[in-house]
Amino acid sequence: MQSASQTSSALPLYVQISELLIRDIAAGRLIDGERLPPEREMAEELGISIGTLRKALADLTEKGLLERIQGSGNYIRQGGTNESVYAMFRLELLSGGGLPRADILNVKRMSKPDDLPAFGTSDEGTRIRRLRYLNDVMIAVEEIWLDGDSGIVKQELLSDSLYRFYQKQLGFWIVRAEDRVTIKDVPDWAPDSFSKAPGTITGYIERFSWADRPKPVEYSRTWFDTDKAHYVQRLK
């Protein structure tokens, strides 16, 4: 189990822990009926306080994914809701799960270039380029375009979850997305720290995302390292 991130762009610590456990449950790394380690042991392993851990466990209990039995412990329960900040984030470590986080490379508002497919209602958009991680493993580079009519993006307010940022700062929620998964060359702007050099063929995801409007408000493209992560879509 990985320690939680405390960077300025990170989600609150208890949300990070809740999200990590939700993704581990979805990936089958935590199974129905499994007893979690004692709370003090978990908190020490994660590098957080007992109070923070208990807030995360309370969130899981509210979602029906955890049963807390006085004097016995905390037990995983399948069948609850897997609603989470990262419900639409489909990349997982090869071993399953992993807590997503991101490093921002740059943010720029500009005219939409000709190579972008049609989306939104404005001729302008905000381009966000990021490095993506699962736990501490760098797995992808991504480029997100938010339609110019959807609001002003201030880099200092961005969090690891853009969808949470949209909700909290811009007043809308992404309600559905369409993914197209294939392979493509790593872009020339990928930093040297990324595990795949520019021009290397790797996994590729194009996504259109909708809010409560007829046209997509966001278009993104993600190049992911298939030696470290895979795309997972679970149907229920």
Image (cartoon, helix red, strand yellow):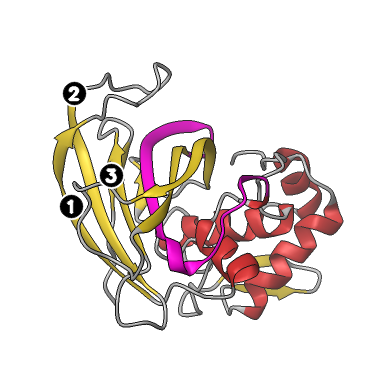
The residue that disc 3 covers is 230
Precedes in sequence: disc 2 or disc 3: 2
* Residue 139 drawn at (x, y percent): 38, 35
Q: Is residue 204 left or right of residue 177?
A: left
Per the image, is 141 magenta? yes
Q: Is residue 94 left or right of residue 200?
A: right
* Residue 8 drawn at (x, y percent): 72, 42
The residue that disc 1 covers is 181
Residue flagged by tag 2: what amino acid is it?
Thr
Residue flagged by tag 1: what amino acid is it?
Val
Precedes in sequence: disc 1 or disc 2: 1
Residue 151 is at least partly visible in this image: yes
* Residue 150 drawn at (x, y percent): 47, 68
Q: Nearer the viewer, residue 219 or 91?
A: 219
Residue flagged by tag 3: what amino acid is it?
His
- CA gap, disc 1 to disc 3? 11 Å
Per the image, is 57 magenta? no
Disc nearest the viewer among 2 and 3: 2
Q: Residue at x 20, y 48 (%)?
A: 114
- Secondary structure of the residue carrying tag 3 is strand
Q: Residue at x 60, y 39 (%)?
A: 2
Q: Is residue 225 left or right of residue 167?
A: left
- Secondary structure of the residue carrying tag 2 is loop
